[in-house]
Amino acid sequence: MTTTPKRPILSFLWRPNEITPAVVEAARQTSTGAIFDVGTHTTEDTAKALRAAGATDIKITAEEVMHTAREGFLQDSGVKTVWVEYHPALVTGTPEAFLERLHALSTRFRCIPISGDLALLTLILQAAQPPGAVALKGAETAGFVSNETTGILYATLREMASHQEQCPEVMIWGGVATPEAAAAFLCSGVKGVVFESLHWQTDLVSADQSLKQRLSRLRPEHTAVV
């Protein structure tokens, strides 16, 4: 009897210059996930590096995934899961068009939208065929974020999901900095947590020592929402 392996409960985000077999092997040995933040670097060289490293997960922007020409990159890279970051300020098309595009790609790749936009999350829950999973990105994370905290997003999504027949699995993207916080989300039904920068203290991350020291001194009160 064979079983389908489940996704890792904990995953870590890596930069393009860290696409190496060593990172992929470290993730395998620790039963965690390695997600490579490709962003807009959807080049032939990046695809070759991903395939050579044995990478399975990448993160790209919504704008990139909307271009049909990027399908060749996804195919050449050999990845299986595509995490797509959506923020309304960075997307020119409609959220409906974005979800249609993800649905089309889902026949070949596992597509997971990353968002804290309540309008998009509502559409996902109301869709006849929603994505299999969604990653919530709250105000505690880096970059373009939600107006709401991760906790508020998750509570809101759970309330909306209680009125739906089928719902995607929920994951948390960034903003979780302690074991207690991760455990709290996992115990309440979250299927996974992605850490954006906690692992930057390790030797596998090619950040200089001064940056690692500054990161080690960061505290929650140092975060600002603009």
Image (tube, rainbow, N blue to C red):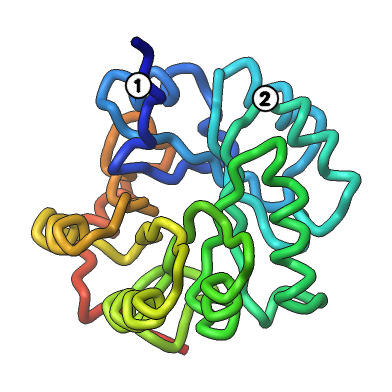
Give above or below for 68 relative to 108: below
Q: Position of residue 107 (x, y in %)?
A: 71, 40
Amino acid type at circle 2 is Gly
- The N terminus sits in image quarter: top left
Q: Position of residue 53 (x, y in %)?
A: 56, 19
User: Front-most of 162 and 11?
Assistant: 162
Q: Position of residue 105 (x, y in %)?
A: 74, 46
Which type of secondary structure does the marked residue at label 2 adopt? Answer: loop
* Residue that badge 1 annotates: 28
Give above or below for 45 relative to 16: above
Residue displayed at 38% across by 36% down: 7
Amino acid type at circle 1 is Arg
Name, please, the residue furthest toward the left.
Answer: 180
Residue 137 picture quarter: bottom left
Residue displayed at 60% across by 48% down: 111
Name, please, the residue furthest toward the top.
Answer: 1
Which type of secondary structure does the marked residue at label 1 adopt? Answer: helix
Residue 78's tag is 2
Residue 139 shows in the view = no
Name, please, the residue furthest toward the front.
Answer: 165
Q: Position of residue 70 (x, y in %)?
A: 83, 44
Residue 51 appears left or right of 81: right
